[in-house]
Image (tube, rainbow, N blue to C red):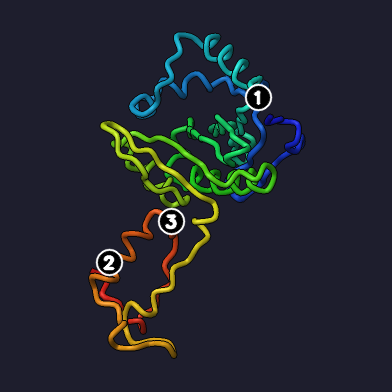
Amino acid sequence: MFQKKILDRKFKINRKKIILKKLKFNHISKNYFNWFKDRQAKLFINSRYESKQQLLDFIKKELKKKNIIYFGIFNNSSRHIGNIKFHDIDLKKKSAWLGIFIGEKKFRSQNIGCNTINLLTDYLYKKLDLSIFYLKVDKKNIPAIKSYKKSGFFIIKNYRKEYLMRMNIFYSKLILGTAQFGNPYGITYKKKNSLNIINTKNILNKCKSNIFTLDTAEDYNINKN
């Protein structure tokens, strides 16, 4: 069974723009309730709270659950600007779901979400051996989708209003070499086995859900269409 105590009690990641800590109840800022009143935020979050006390009661219960970890996102002035939650943690399957919310509007579109995801998925891999992460995102939330893709997530299911995305921490580190997609390359190269544009597109289509980075160079003479 998952136990939060195996994580570092004094966990803290300090980077140029952000500080990440395990969220505690006393971290909740006075402005926290106002995050959910923001017009833009309302478009893409399901949570609705009638009062500040209702929100605080919900957070208290959430922080006590055994298979959920909340991390607070702070700026360098220790201002609480957002949260990220890992839930439905399954140690046997080495997987978890996540949700992230940058509540303070002026801190959005600064790669904070992407950096937070990368730092914490790496941390949970090292501590809990979690390597597969899932999330759902509204199809209209284009900035979030771009950020998730930048973090290594890929769309694996297309629902009516949302996408299901998955990130495998191993796949996100794989690099596909593309030298043979262009000019003849390698001591084993034979013209009859050369890759044409159809072969190349088929390979890329099969790899697009697993390969995060392509190794390319101008000398490879690849048809990028």
Q: Earlier in the sequence, mark 2 or mark 3?
A: 2
Q: Earlier in the sequence, mark 1 or mark 3?
A: 1
Within 10 Å of the Cα at label 1, are there few (<14), some (14-19), or many (20+) other Cα atoms?
some
Q: Classify 121 as above or below 219.
A: above
Whether pointer 2 and pointer 3 mark residues with C-beta atoms closer than 8 Å, the reply is no
Seen from the viewer's position, the closer of residues 209 and 61 is: 209
Within 10 Å of the Cα at label 3, are there few (<14), some (14-19), or many (20+) other Cα atoms?
many
Q: Helix, strand, or loop for circle 3?
A: loop
Q: Classify 122 as above or below 101.
A: below
Q: Position of residue 13 (x, y in %)?
A: 67, 45
Cα separation, mark 2 vs mark 1, equals: 45 Å
Using the image, tell me which numbered label, if any, was put on residue 210: 3
Q: Find disc 2 in the rendering and name its residue.
A: 201
The type of residue carrying mark 3 is Asn
Q: Going 59% across and 20% down the picture, which residue do you hit?
A: 62
The type of residue carrying mark 2 is Lys
Cα separation, mark 1 vs mark 3, equals: 31 Å
Q: Find disc 1 in the rendering and name its residue.
A: 66
Q: Is residue 8 left or right of residue 86?
A: right
Seen from the viewer's position, the closer of residues 82 and 146 is: 146
Q: Classify 206 as above or below 111.
A: below
Q: Going 45% across and 9% down the picture, which residue do you hit?
A: 50
Q: Going 25% across and 77% down the picture, which residue do you hit?
A: 196
The type of residue carrying mark 1 is Lys
